Image (cartoon, rainbow, N blue to C red):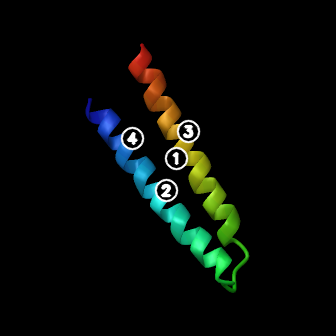
Amino acid sequence: MKKDTILIVAAVVLLVACVVFLTLSMTGGESRAHLPLSLACVATANALIYVRNRRRKK
């Protein structure tokens, strides 16, 4: 049960980071690395949620 909570918290933190990076990329930040970082955060958060769902089914 505790691992599920940790996975949820990590996914939420990654999604918040995703919103921050998306905002930086849309406002024209100097670095062009913000959009790929945002996409990586979304992919990692989805992977964590997928792992959590697989564990709950077993």
Dot label at residue 7: 4
Residue type at the position of mark 4: Leu
Disc 2 vs disc 4: which is toward the camera? 2
Q: Are marks 2 and 1 in contact (CB under 8 Å)?
A: yes
Q: Which secondary structure lies at badge 2?
A: helix
Quadrant (top left/top right/bottom left/bottom right) for the N terminus: top left
Which comes before the other along the chain, label 2 or label 1? 2
Distance, label 2 to label 4, CA atoms, is: 12 Å
Q: Which secondary structure lies at badge 1?
A: helix
Q: Do the residues labelled 2 and 3 touch (CB within 8 Å)?
A: no
x%, y% of residue 29? 66, 84
Q: Do the residues labelled 3 and 1 touch (CB within 8 Å)?
A: yes
Question: Quick one: which residue is furthest to the top in this view?
Answer: 58
Distance, label 3 to label 1, CA atoms, is: 5 Å
x%, y% of residue 36? 70, 62
Residue matched to label 2: 15
Dot 2 crowding, Cα within 10 Å, few <14, some 14–19, many 20+: many
x%, y% of residue 57? 43, 16
Which comes before the other along the chain, label 2 or label 3? 2
Q: Which secondary structure lies at badge 4?
A: helix
Residue matched to label 1: 45
Residue type at the position of mark 2: Leu
Residue type at the position of mark 3: Ala
Quadrant (top left/top right/bottom left/bottom right) for the C terminus: top left
Which comes before the other along the chain, label 1 or label 4? 4
Please determine whether, in this image, residue 52 is positioned above or below residue 43: above
Which residue occupies 26% across, 34% down? Answer: 2
